[in-house]
Amino acid sequence: MNDKLPSREQALRLLYENRCSAEVVKHCKAVAKLGLEIAQALKAKGINVDPELVEIGAILHDIGRSKTHSVHHAVVGAEIAKSEGLPDSVVSIIKRHVGGGITSSEAEELGWPTGDVYVPLTLEEKIVSYADKLIEKSKRVPIEVTIKQLSRGLKPEAAERVRKLHEEMNALIGDQP
């Protein structure tokens, strides 16, 4: 496994090579822009974070949408990333970005590989997952919109995880970047 991150251009090329739609690419760019802003704001506060990993992980977080638009895009995307020889840090961001995280029991219900972790653990994983929840299509939305949609979609556990992620990020960032 390669530890070297691809460049921004290489990451975008991977989206195109895997036939992601223009809309998905636009969304990934918007998530990357916001994720990078958050990472840079945290770094400016002296918090240890890797802005480059956040940017590349955010660009590639939805690569699995080239094959499916269901929640399974996270696992499919992680497989694509592994097959492309991307670093584990990027594979984990892709695998762990959905719904503020997927619990072991939810993963089992979805038929995902057991024994894997689908909840964001590192700061970089949390930033990408959080930025993704603040971008709808390619526009910034208040976190309350995402939480309301998850609650309405009969996913109260996911809504609660996103709320907790929002609180954790706000505690680190203060006012949103």
Image (cartoon, rainbow, N blue to C red):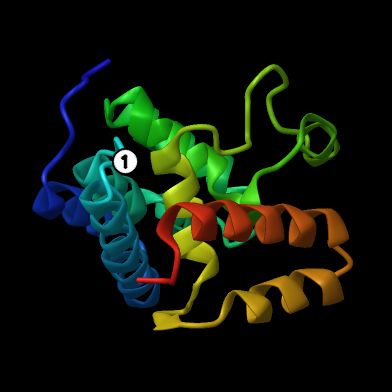
* Left or right: 111 as drawn, with respect to 87: right
| Closer to the camera in the image, 102 or 69 | 102
Residue 25 on image: x %, y %: 31, 68
Q: Residue at x 27, y 63 (%)?
A: 37
> In the rendered image, is residue 64 in sight?
no
> In the rendered image, is residue 106 in sight?
yes
Please state, as top left, top right, bottom left or bottom right, where the C terminus lies in the image. bottom left
Picture quadrant of residue 124: top left
* Left or right: 17 as drawn, with respect to 114: left
Question: Where is mark 1, residue-wise?
Answer: 47
* Left or right: 155 as drawn, with respect to 5: right
| Closer to the camera in the image, 177 or 171 | 171
Q: Residue at x 65, y 44 (%)?
A: 101
Look at the picture and state if 35 lies above or below 93: below
Picture quadrant of residue 174: bottom left
Mark 1 closeness class: few <14, some 14–19, many ≥20 residues within 10 Å: some
Q: Residue at x 13, y 47 (%)?
A: 10
Q: Which three-letter amino acid code belongs to the residue tagged 1?
A: Ile
Helix, strand or loop at label 1? It is loop
Look at the picture and state if 121 lies above or below 25: above
Residue 141 on image: x %, y %: 52, 83
Picture quadrant of residue 50: top left
| Closer to the camera in the image, 74 or 174 | 174
Residue 120 on image: x %, y %: 55, 38
Q: Residue at x 20, y 49 (%)?
A: 11
